[in-house]
Image (cartoon, rainbow, N blue to C red):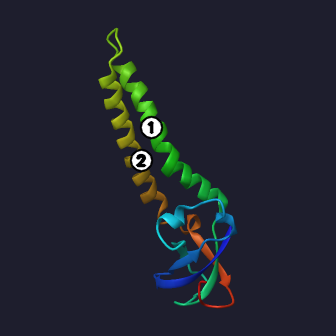
Amino acid sequence: MIECGVIVSTKDGFATIQMQKGDNCKDCNICDSFGGGFRSIEAVNHIGAKIGDRVEVEIKSYNLLKYSFLVFIFPILMLIGGYFAGISLFNNGETNEGYGILGAFIGLLLSFILIKTIDKLVGGNKKTYAQIVHLSAGSELK
């Protein structure tokens, strides 16, 4: 997926890019909930673009899907799995909802710890970041 935006800051080979809603976002309204229909993204700046340059950014669909699953779906699965694990581990012949709820919270907490650990392991890998592919014409968002 390729999106356009304007560089608002640069640091250590990375650029923060403010992007407006593109064609790929037509059915999504998340940016509108943050105000103005704009979003910011950090991308690897291989081409040495400067603040104010309009650039095209490539976001690999595979990485987008993988990390969206990790952040949005994985905690829910861990919550549900923790619930059933809590019930089955502490089953004393009768169903006890309290253990299930406790297990659900433990599963959710574990999911956050795992996500943070994965972020630390993968966060420094520039292959997972969006990449600036080239400069575009113009320098302002509409």
Q: Which mark is residue 9?
A: none
Check disc 2: other Cα within 10 Å, few if <14, some if 14-19, many if 20+.
Answer: some
Q: Which mark is residue 78?
A: 1
Look at mark 2 in the image and give the residue it sits on.
114
Q: Nearer the viewer, residue 21 or 133?
A: 21
Q: Is residue 8 left or right of residue 87?
A: right
Res. 20 image quadrant = bottom right
Give x and y (percent) for residue 118: 45, 53
What SS does tag 2 mark? helix
Q: Earlier in the sequence, mark 1 or mark 2?
A: 1
Q: Disc 1 vs disc 2: Cβ atoms closer than 8 Å?
A: yes
Mark 1 vs mark 2: in front: 1
Res. 57 image quadrant = bottom right
Check disc 1: other Cα within 10 Å, few if <14, some if 14-19, many if 20+.
Answer: many
- Name which residue type carries label 1: Met
Q: At x 46% / y 67%, what residue is drawn?
A: 34
Q: At x 37% / y 33%, what residue is drawn?
A: 104
Q: What is the distance, in whole Å, between disc 1 and disc 2 at their CAs?
A: 11 Å
